[in-house]
Amino acid sequence: MDLTQLSPDQVVYWQWGFWKLNATIVFTWGVMTVMIAVAWLITRRVTAAADIPRGQNALETIVDYIREQIREISGGDRPDPYLPFVGTLFLFIAVANLFAIVPGYVPPTASLSTTAALAGAVFLAVPAYGIARQGIRPYLRHYVQPNPVMLPFNIIGDLSRTLALAVRLFGNVMSGAKIVAVLVAVIPFLFPIVFRALGLLTGMIQAYIFAVLAMVYIASAMSATGESRGNEPDKEKSSERSDR
């Protein structure tokens, strides 16, 4: 990629009017195709026997790790409802960044449009999980807690954390890719290899952080009105004691 191009959105392979086929779209669909193909190859012969294939063992290890992380972040809740969404976020970002070792490949996460789409998915998932668990009225009520004056601030908080998710991932991945590209042009030997390895590590860390933050936001939505509901049994117990 040209060093003057800050985003894979600027690498256009085909254009017809307003329609553009850029590197972001090509590499995003490429990553999704690889993930679907690998998942199909591994899961088509899933077995519960003691001697399982290496691919199934690796996939189960990853899934178990994600499940455990979700359980810890959510405070002990069942991870199954959140696993498809949070796990997909983590795996997509991780694989997209991992493919940076392929010559000519540019991570789609180095595009603000991709990171904004991922952050937008989190923005929609947070109220969706919250409403599914608490109901629409109890969930919306937390926006005016402790008083209605906090309504605009709570809304701004939701929007700002979504923007922070998108910009954080975009900035880290894009800057890492540009640094490696500059070093390849200036010192095309040892240092680019070292920085590319560090870039892969950074990409994995960014995937983990994005998934963790997404789960933290969802968990906060799940418990936003749960605390008020959790106080109701205490009130009932105190009233029973007073009656006695």
Image (cartoon, rainbow, N blue to C red):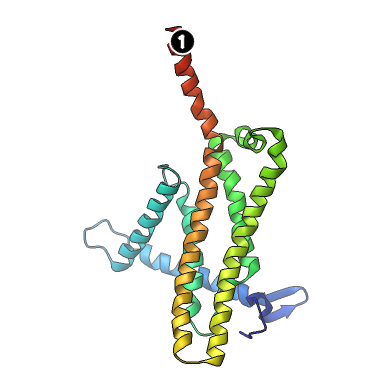
The image quadrant that residue 62 belongs to is: bottom left
- Please state if 113 lies on the left or on the right of 31 as rendered: right
Instruction: Say above or below: 34 vs 75.
Output: below
Q: How many marks?
A: 1
Seen from this angle, which residue lies furthest top? 244
Residue type marked 1: Ser
Instruction: Say above or below: 94 vs 230.
Output: below
Instruction: Say above or below: 122 vs 205.
Output: above
Q: Residue at x 56, y 42 (%)?
A: 221
Q: Residue at x 52, y 33 (%)?
A: 227
Seen from this angle, which residue lies furthest left? 50
Residue 179: x and y in percent read: 56, 81
Quadrant that contains the N terminus: bottom right
Residue 129: x and y in percent read: 55, 44
Nearer to the camera, 22 or 72:
72
Please say whether residue 34 is visible from this viewpoint. Answer: no
Disc 1: which residue: 242
Q: Residue at x 45, y 7 (%)?
A: 243
Residue 144: x and y in percent read: 67, 35
The image quadrant that residue 121 belongs to is: bottom right
Nearer to the camera, 84 or 179:
179
Please say whether residue 37 is visible from this viewpoint. Answer: yes
Quadrant that contains the C terminus: top left
Residue 50: x and y in percent read: 21, 58
- Please state if 212 lies on the left or on the right of 48 as rendered: right
Q: Residue at x 28, y 59 (%)?
A: 47
The image quadrant that residue 153 belongs to is: top right
Q: Secondary structure at mark 1?
A: helix
Instruction: Say above or below: 33 vs 120.
Output: below
